[in-house]
Amino acid sequence: MDDAAPDAVPDAVPAADPTPHGERGIGELVAAGERSVSFEFMPPRDEAGAAQLWSAISDLEPYQPTFVSVTYGAGGTTRDTTVQITGRIARETSLRALGHLTCVGHTREELVEVLRAYQQAGVRNLLALRGDPKEGPTAPWTPTPGGLTYAVELVELAHEVGSFSVGVAAFPEGHPSAASLQTDARVLADKARAGADFAVTQLFFRPDDYFRLVERVAARGVELPILPGIMPITNLGSLRRMAELSGATIPQAVLARFDGLTEPADVRRVGVEVATELCEALLAGGAPGLHFYTLNRSRATLEIFEALRITA
Ligand code: FAD
């Protein structure tokens, strides 16, 4: 019979620590003041996707990013692949790996299992997220029975399980269902107080949205490095879909720059220019780094690096 308190974390399986990068967590590195660069990948759907992912990873590895992250599919659908890929990056490359985890569809015990699986795989950095309802990001949120309600609880759980540097999501334009920008800043400050030591933002296009978020959080007496998330525009159709899903606004001034462009090569050239200008404004204003949504492709990010004169 199990006589442990119902909400206690079960005894730790002694975690193997095969990671060569376990010494310093991401929060510590970002807070140490060196400019951070990071890349986000998604678990591939098939073999061709896997080949594309590993090719992008090897193209970007020479730039020695602070970390690379792997998303956790909506509804926990990619649980095993996300843990496997993140673990493989941690063990087989020179890169520091960060695994995403969401509360969707998982009981607390299942979340503990995934956290332990990350530990066993040598992953010591976690992005603790609530996730979205299966019906989409704007549908009403109902927690899984026996699961967690908000990301802040997952931050706490990750620290109970132990030895993670924990990051969280931040929203320059506010989370789509947040009551106000101030409420959203309070939520972020609460996540920092619960033990998050860095944040990564949703994609956005106006530097001021980012700087105002940083100010709102600082005004709450919290020091939290917030890494801006950059989505290079390479295809207008997919950008509109991503913006719809994330709640990000594509400013009219940005859209106007693509007016009349029909050739894909022209769209990506302007997309790279737009992203480069955003990166320049963010770094000039004191952002601690840049986090690139790569969509498992390296080309746009490499073109932005060239424009920013970031070298391998
Ligand atoms: P929370 O911090 O829990 O916030 C969710 C909502 O609840 C917000 O409106 C917040 O204001 C409100 N809230 C929070 N706490 C309280 C409280 N105590 N009282 C009242 N209201 C509260 N999704 C995936 O499925 N997989 C991924 O891999 C993934 N990666 C992401 C990476 C980044 C960098 C970002 C920015 C988002 C990512 N997402 C991912 C999407 C994310 O899961 C959704 O945006 C989700 O809706 C919010 O997650 P959160 O962690 O910010 O949740």
Image (tube, rainbow, N blue to C red):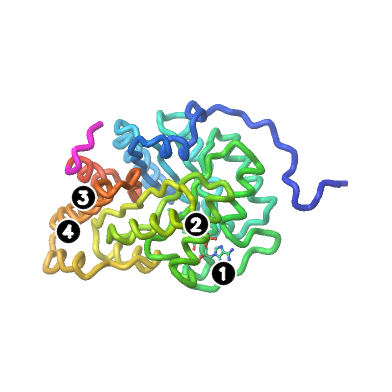
Instruction: Name the residue: 61% across, 45% down.
Output: 158
Q: Residues within 10 Å of mark 1 (few under 14, many from 20)?
A: some
**Residue placed under numbered mark 3 in the picture:** 276
Q: Amino acid at mark 2?
A: Leu
Distance from the alpha carbon under mark 4 to that under mark 1: 36 Å
Kindly indicate whether the residue at mark 1 contacts the one at mark 2 (C-beta within 8 angstroms).
Answer: no
| Mark 2 sits near ligand 1, with its Cβ under 8 Å away | yes
Work out whether mark 3 precedes mark 1 in sequence or the reverse, and give the earlier one.
1
Q: Is residue 129 above or below residue 180?
A: above
Instruction: Give the quarter of the figure containing the C terminus.
Output: top left
**Residue placed under numbered mark 2 in the picture:** 188
Work out whether mark 4 precedes mark 1 in sequence or the reverse, and give the earlier one.
1
Distance from the alpha carbon under mark 2 to that under mark 4: 35 Å
Work out whether mark 3 precedes mark 2 in sequence or the reverse, and give the earlier one.
2
**Residue placed under numbered mark 1 in the picture:** 141
In the image, farthest residue toward the right: 1
Q: Position of residue 159 (x, y in %)?
A: 62, 43
Q: Main secondary structure of the magenta part?
A: loop
User: Considering the numbered disc 2 on the image, is that residue within a helix, a strand or a loop?
Assistant: helix
- In the rendered image, which quarter is residue 75 located in? bottom right
Kindly indicate whether the residue at mark 1 contacts the one at mark 3 (C-beta within 8 angstroms).
Answer: no
Kindly indicate whether the residue at mark 1 contacts the one at mark 4 (C-beta within 8 angstroms).
Answer: no
In this view, the mark in front (3 or 2): 2
Q: Which mark is residue 267?
A: 4
Q: Amino acid at mark 1?
A: Trp
